[in-house]
Amino acid sequence: MQLNIKKLGLSLAAVTLLTATSVYAADTKKVSANKSASASKSSYTENQFLDTFSGKSKSLVSAKLGAPAKKELSVKPAGAAGFLGKVGADEKNSKRVNVEMWYYNNIVNYDPKNKYKETEITFVNDKVMNIAFFNNR
């Protein structure tokens, strides 16, 4: 009986891994197909970019810039609930906050001849809350 439970567990793990891999592969194809579309968009100066996108919705950013080169979702760190309880935060009565980061490559100029390698746009509940420009990644 113990051997059958192990086989069942391994089978479920294999199915889960294959499903996750196929979903990731499909998403990677979409992002790479849209990467060239976003690269053909016009470039911005730092101030133009900040004025154009600060506080705007995710749909407006997507419409103007196309699909990002990379997306990341923020997750609550392990042990955060214990820390929040110590400082008096009431998680049961608070609203869920969705944080997502989108990354675009080579769209913001910092001088007439050079562009930042990467621009990070952070959305909090589908509104732009933070914009960062990077050359060191």
Image (tube, grey):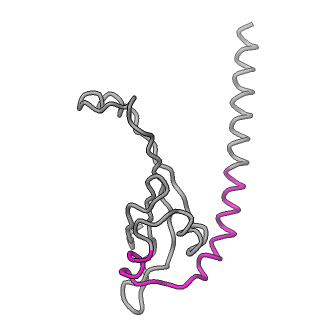
Q: Residue furthest top?
A: 1
Residue 25 colored in magenta in the image: yes
Q: Position of residue 93 (x, y in %)?
A: 38, 31
Quadrant housing residue 120: bottom left
Q: Residue at x 41, y 87 (%)?
A: 114
Instruction: Write down the quadrant of residue 91 in the picture.
Output: top left
- Left or right position of 38 against 33: left
Q: Position of residue 71 (x, y in %)?
A: 54, 58
Q: Is residue 80 left or right of residue 4?
A: left
Image quarter of the N terminus? top right
Q: Which residues are magenta?
A: 24-52
- Residue at the image position 42 percent from the left and 66 percent from the top: 137
Dominant SS type (magenta): helix
Could you tell me residue 135's position as x and y percent? 39, 73
Q: Quick one: 82 or 17, which is closer to the camera?
A: 82
The residue depicted at 41 percent of the width and 65 percent of the height is 55
Q: Is residue 93 above or below residue 32?
A: above
Residue 21: percent from the left, percent from the top? 69, 46
Corner quadrant of residue 26:
bottom right
